[in-house]
Image (cartoon, rainbow, N blue to C red):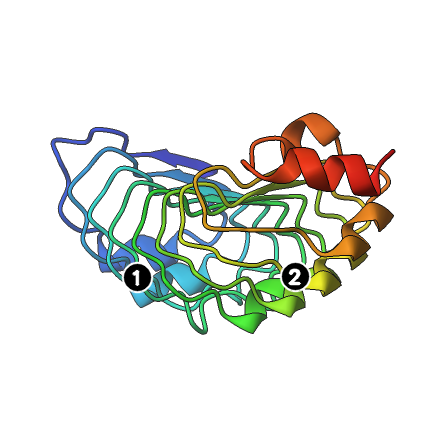
Amino acid sequence: FFCFNLFLCVFLQSLPRKLKNLQNLRMLCVRNNLISALPRGIQYLHELRVFDCSFNQIATLPPLQNLKNLKHFQCYDNMLSDIENVFGNGNQSLELLNLSQNYISVLPDSIGSIPNLTYLDLERNRITNVPESLNRLKFLKFLFLGFNGITRLPAALSSASALEELHLQENQIAELPPSFRELKNLKVGALLLVRVLLLIVASCWI
């Protein structure tokens, strides 16, 4: 198998353990089911490129660092609260990561160890702090952090120099670090989603 699509598959509640035997599987879609957990055997699907398990009831994820060829992972609209030890520098190929609409409260430092990440969506979670390790994401272009409880952004985030869009609406951020003027590729329109940023834009980009 190269593609395994279980989208709306009679409201599947679990994945078969023998799934790990599909060593050539490259695309796996199990969205819109009733899955509460993923089998640890997922980590043995070394050829997997695209994995979508959105719109389920998944509360925890197994370690996914062995999926060295995984490019797109979407697990939005689930029940995730802890993603510690799930991602890391083993995810050399990961470019798109969407974990929006979950219950994540803490972002582990390991999130900054995904070297080729370009798109990161963490909107509508319960995040209050953004780790400085995100400054290591040198290819990150799109960062979605809206609808959380974030109170401040680390100044080191300005080192993510490829950033083009930064979505921060509906947080508790009072000001941006002055170092954000170094984000030369950032579109001002994206920054205006924060209530106080008219003053920041006036002082930093004019």
**Residue 2 shows in this picture:** yes
Give x and y (percent) for residue 189: 68, 26
Considering the image in quadrants, where does the C terminus appear? top right
Amino acid at dot 1:
Ser
Which residue is nearer to you in this view: 89 or 40?
89
- Left or right: residue 41 versus residue 16 is right
Question: Is residue 89 visible to us here?
Answer: no
Residue occupied by mark 2: 134
Check whether the beta carbons of the residues at disc 2 and disc 1 lie within 8 A of each other: no
The residue that mark 1 highlights is 81
Helix, strand or loop at mark 2: helix
> Could you tell me how many numbered marks the image carries?
2
Measuring 57% from the left and 70% from the top, which residue is drawn there? 110
* CA neighbours of label 2 inside 10 A, class few (<14), some (14 to 19), many (20+): many
The amino acid type found where label 2 is placed reads Leu
Tell which circle, 2 or 1, labels the residue nearer the N-terminal end: 1
Q: Secondary structure at mark 1?
A: loop
Residue at image position (66%, 50%) is 117
Location of residue 75 in the rendering, given as x and y in whole percent from the top left corner:
38, 45
Q: Quadrant of residue 44?
A: bottom left
Residue at 47% in and 41% down: 146
